[in-house]
Amino acid sequence: MADGKGGPELSWQTVVGALSAVAILGTAGWTVFQTQFANIEKELAADRARAQELQASLDKYQTIREFSGYRADTAREIDDLARRTIVLEASQAKAAREPVEAKTFEAVSKATDDRVTLLQNQLNDVNRQIAAALVIIDQNRGNRGSPVPLPP
């Protein structure tokens, strides 16, 4: 205001002081940024470790849940088999008490046994015929003198 225009007077000391203040603030900002960046890397490593721990806990929990589900399914199957056994025992006891049903049951069992025996005999006959055919084939190959290679 010495010249009467009403404007601020700037000296070289004011300019150097202002530039120094800006430089100090810039350096402080850079330092804070670098410190925060280093902390982010540490936090990232800690977060990864926590994520691994949580995944391990989740895996254990899922394994426990799967095993619990397996146990529940097995218990249901055992209960179902127990109910079926009770029904079968009751029907057999009833069939033994009622002679007509017992005779029918025995007749069905005998017919089933006879049918199984017949099927076994037929299978034995077929096996004998196959064995006889193989013997004849082997004898015919022996007459030729050259063995035929087996298929792979």
Image: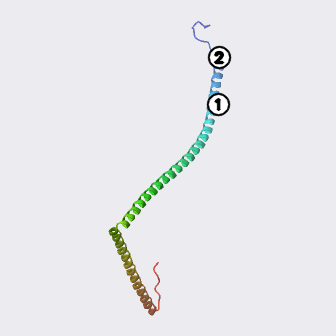
x and y percent of residue 49 in the render?
60, 43
Q: Amino acid at mark 1?
A: Thr
Q: Residue at x 38, y 67 (%)?
A: 96
Question: Is 128 above or below relative to 87?
Answer: below
Decide which of 32, 2 is in the foreground and name it: 32
Give the residue furthest to the right: 13
Q: Residue at x 50, y 51 (%)?
A: 66
Decide which of 59, 110 is in the foreground and name it: 110
Q: Is residue 63 left or right of residue 88?
A: right
Label 1 element class: helix
x and y percent of residue 41 in the render?
61, 39
Quadrant of res 101: bottom left
Q: Amino acid at mark 2?
A: Thr
**Figure quadrant of the N terminus:** top right
x and y percent of residue 118 in the render?
37, 79
Give the residue furthest to the top: 4
x and y percent of residue 4 in the render?
59, 6
Question: Is 22 above or below relative to 85?
Answer: above
Q: Say which residue label 2 marks.
A: 14
User: How many marks do you count on the picture?
Assistant: 2
Q: Tag 1: Cα neighbours inside 10 Å, few (<14), some, or many (≥20)? A: few
Decide which of 92, 8 is in the foreground and name it: 92
Q: Say which residue label 1 marks.
A: 31
Mark 2–mark 1 distance (CA, rounded to whole Å): 25 Å
Camera-side mark, 2 or 1: 1
Question: Is 9 above or below relative to 119?
Answer: above
Q: Which mark is residue 132?
A: none
Q: Residue at x 37, y 81 (%)?
A: 122
Label 2 element class: helix
Decide which of 88, 126 is in the foreground and name it: 88
